[in-house]
Structure formats: C-alpha cells, structure tokens
Image (cartoon, grey):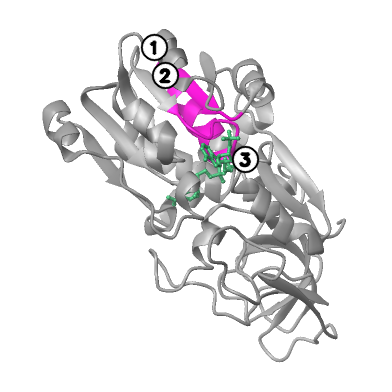
Amino acid sequence: RQSIIFAKRPAGAITDDTFIVRSSTIPDPGPGEVLTRTLWLSIDPYMRGRLNEGATYTTGTPLGSVMTGETIGEVVASAHPNFAPGDIVAGAFGWETHILSGGDGLTRVPRDGAPLSTYLGVLGMPGTTAYSGMKDIGQPKPGETVVVSAACGPVGATAGQIARRAGARVIGIAGGPEKCRWVTETARFDACLNHRGDLDAQLDEACPDGVDVYFENVGGAVQAAILKRLNTHARVPVCGLVAQYDDPDPRPVLNLNLLLYKRARFEGFIVGDKPGRFAEWRTLAAPLVASGELRYCEEIVDGLDNAPAALRGQLTGRNFGKLLVKVADL
Ligand code: NDP
C-alpha cells in the first residue's frame, strides 16, 4: 500500500518536501471494517487550505497524516454488514492506494451508471458546488449577464451551463485560448475571456451592460476587474479564491462602498453545509450528463505519486478541466 503523507507545511506554494510517500503492508479488515482499493483520487483547490496552520472553515490535515481527499474505490474485503467485495464506493479518506475504514462516510456508486470519475466531478462535489451557488445565491434570470471565473474547471463549467439553461447570457473567464475554446465550443458559453490577456478591454466588449451575477472562483486581479462592472442588485456567490490560496496574507480588493451603492449581495458558501444537495444535484444532473446536454472535461494524471505535482499545478491553472489521479484500473 502507498500513502501520501503531509510532511512539511508550505510557506507559500507547495514544494517537493510538502509530501512524502509511505509504503506499508495492505491491512486486513477487522470486525466492522471495509478495505477498498482506490481507483480514482480527486484533486481539488480546497486541499491547499488543508495545509495551513489554523482552521479555515474546517480543520486542516494534521502534519504526519495521510493527505485529505475524495476517492472512488472498489471494496476488496469486508467485515462490514453493508459492504461486499465488488461494491464501488465514494469516500473522503485520503491519498492512499488502499483505504481501511469503518464504513462511515462511504456511499455506494452505481457500477453501470455514468463513468466513475464523474462522481468526483460534474456529478460529485464540484458539480454540487456549482448548483448550490447558483440556486441559493446567483439565481440567474433570462437575459441577465452572468460571469463565471475558472470556467474550464468542474465548478465553473457547471455553474455557467446552469446559468445558460436559466436563460442568462454567460461569459466565462479562463487562462488561455485553448481553455476559452473549450468553454465556448463545448460548454457553449456565449463568450470566454482570457485573463492572461487584457481582461479590462475584453470585459468592456463582452459585458457592455454590466454584470448581474459574478460566480467567484478565483479572487485577485480577475475579481477586481469584474467588481467594477457590477450592476445594481448584482449577486456574487463567493465560491472560491484560488488565486489567493498560496498567499499567506492576501490583500482585500472589495471596497464596501460597492455593496452599498450597488445594493449587491455577496455571499460565501460551503457545499458541505447542505448535505441534501449532493443527491438532489446527482438526480437532476445524471440524465443531462448522459444525454450530452451537460458537458464536462477531465484531465487525468496516472499514479498516486503524481498527486502532489498535480495539486501544485492546479493552483496555477496547469490543469485542463476536472483534475483526477487514476490510481488503478477497475
Ligand atoms: P479548477 O479545476 O477550476 O482549478 C482551479 C483553476 O483556477 C485553475 O485551473 C485556473 O484556471 C484557475 N486559477 C488558478 N490561479 C488563478 C489566478 N491567479 N487567476 C485566475 N484564475 C486562476 O477548480 P474547481 O473547479 O475544482 O474549483 C473552482 C473553485 O471553486 C476553487 O476556488 C475552489 O476552491 C472552489 N470550490 C469551492 C467549494 C465550496 O464549497 N465553496 C467547493 C469546491 C470548490 P485558469 O487557467 O482558467 O485560470
């Protein structure tokens, strides 16, 4: 068994010594325990926050322990009444090739449904995040202008497609022409702007009537450019601030005058706060994914030992779509 251990707290960006690989013997399940073989590991920006000292919205990963992460795995041995060998399960037990658990937090995933990786992306936590933020806070209406940052990623791509289905005009922001092409041609956003170019000029052209909803995934310079264009009664679901995650002391760009003058609504949210949303979204989205109406893209990295480099790359935009580590074949 291989496990990736959180070994050294990074001061800024993740470095080569942030994680180490530990090998050990594959354990046998004791009474009430389940052993799963990991097939897929999800790599998500929130993981950077787990490496910081002190709590964010939840406690961090303790130094010296297995790195936190969601996985899809196959049960290989079970002494638990609810799980049998061959079951496919999702859980949040960490960066390991084999996971021993008491079964709490393991949910069964259909073997013959959507591709298993989608339960970590468009049908899983990131898709549910997009759904929650748009449903509770963004609330896009027909004809409104909605801007979504990190538009090629699983949260942004899904959020934009939800807004488009609600009849809004949707503008994505992504890092580079290839990502922008995917966002417009495959995810069918109305336009996509490259934040590595002159974003102000592109926003002037794409949003002549201002912005009614800004689905915030990145913060930093992108946020500053969009906030200037908010319309009266704009809504801003504050989902993530990935441009700032490596910065120990990010400078705020929001001037509270804006909230007052524009009567704007900014609201932070965490997907886990409403656990019922996961099943609700999966029920809604599974047929849309199956029919091809809801599009997604994935970047797959092979081998658990490549997970640290994958996370490091995601925080600077090197991933193209939902980032996954393929740990083993089914
Ligand atoms: P992505 O796959 O979209 O990966 C993050 C992307 O952020 C990168 O690919 C990059 O895309 C973009 N990015 C990185 N640095 C910068 C920068 N300096 N300026 C602009 N963009 C940058 O991630 P997800 O779809 O999984 O997550 C998107 C956001 O949602 C994250 O902020 C994440 O933390 C948040 N989130 C929040 C949850 C919640 O409960 N609130 C739950 C899940 C996710 P590009 O090259 O296009 O710039």
Residue wearing tag 2: 200
For the residues bearing labels 2 and 3, Cβ distance under 8 angstroms: no
Q: Residue at x 41, y 21 (%)?
A: 166
> Quick one: quadrant of the N terminus?
bottom right
Sequence-wise, which precedes: disc 3 or disc 1? 1
Tag on residue 317? 3
Name which residue lies at 48% across and 54% down.
Answer: 245
Indicate yes or no: mark 1 CB to ligand 1 under 8 Å: no
Residue 153 placement: quadrant: top right
- Percent across and percent down for residue 35 are 75, 77
- Three-letter amino acid code at the position of disc 1: Asp
User: Dot 2 lies on which element?
Assistant: helix
Q: Is residue 40 visible?
A: no
First in sequence: mark 2 vs mark 3: 2
Instruction: Read off the residue under disc 1.
Output: 204
Q: CA distance from mark 3 to mark 1?
A: 24 Å
Task: Indicate left or right for 173 with 86 as reference.
Answer: left
Residue 211: percent from left, percent from top: 32, 20
Along the line of sight, the residue nearer the viewer: 294 or 320:
320
SS at mark 3 in the image: loop
Q: Position of residue 219 (x, y in %)?
A: 41, 41
Q: Nearer the viewer, mark 2 or mark 3?
A: 2
Q: Amino acid at mark 3?
A: Gly
What span is in magenta? 148-175
Asked if the residues shown at circle 2 and circle 1 are in contact, with their CB atoms under 8 angstroms apart, the answer is: yes
Q: Is residue 130 visible?
A: yes
Q: Is residue 17 above or below residue 138?
A: below
The residues bearing labels 2 and 3 have C-alpha atoms spaced at a distance of 20 Å
Please state the total of marks drawn on the protein image: 3
